[in-house]
Amino acid sequence: MRNRSTVAAALVLALACAAAPAASAAELEGVSMPDHSEAGGQSLVLNGLGLREKFFVNVYVAGLYLPAKQTSEKAILGADTPRHVVMHFQHDATKQQICDGWGESLEANRPNAGAALEKDFDTLCSMMADIEDGEEMAFTYVPGTGTAVSVKGEEKGTIEGKEFADALFASWIGEHPATGKLKKGLLGG
């Protein structure tokens, strides 16, 4: 009788463990990111992970979060919905290197940017800091609010407007991203 109770208890435990949802995460180059995030009260899903390399050096792993999985950068940038990017650095970068990257992205993806958008990117640059291996930056766009900027876990401020958010997110998934491999990964490819 006791043996049946033990077997029954073991069976119940096994079924409970099998039915429990696993805490899932995606991983790339040793960097793990959760499958879900939140922005503006809306649940977001991890669309993809991408690796930014420069001169054969892994600079950062980025994760793109959206309301629903999407493979088209035009659909993502065209929609006025929340989006979130996390950059987990795997190599040190100076504030100047980061700002130079933002400038190159703006020039490549918005060659005719007006003064207001250029000023927004100057504001973004003022929020940057030297980054070390293992530290993160995050950018969260919420319609009607703007793009919140977080550097090393510290909220730096919010830059208003969808035009800025689209230009910033084009750095990763636009026509001329930092690298094609980064864009492909973020778009789930």
Image: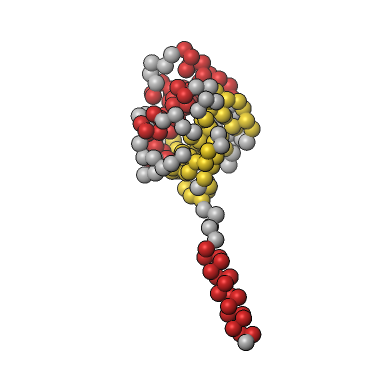
11 in relation to 129, above or below = below
Q: Nearer the viewer, residue 88 or 12?
A: 12
- For the N terminus, the image quarter is bottom right
Give the image location of residue 98, x and y in percent. 52, 28
Q: Residue furthest bottom?
A: 1
Q: Is residue 85 visible?
A: yes
In the picture, measured across the screen, residue 94 lies left or right of residue 185, that is right
Q: Nearer the viewer, residue 176 or 64?
A: 64
Give the image location of residue 28, x and y in percent. 47, 48
Residue at the image point whose x is 50% and y is 22% from the top? 161
In which quadrant of the rendered view does residue 148 lie? Answer: top right
Give the image location of residue 131, x and y in percent. 58, 34
181 in relation to 175, above or below = below
- For the C terminus, the image quarter is top left
In which quadrant of the rendered view does residue 76 lie? Answer: top left
- Numbered disc total: 0
Q: Nearer the viewer, residue 92 or 36?
A: 36
8 in relation to 181, above or below = below
Q: Residue furthest top?
A: 115
Q: Is residue 56 visible?
A: no
Residue at the image point whose x is 52% and y is 45% from the top? 36
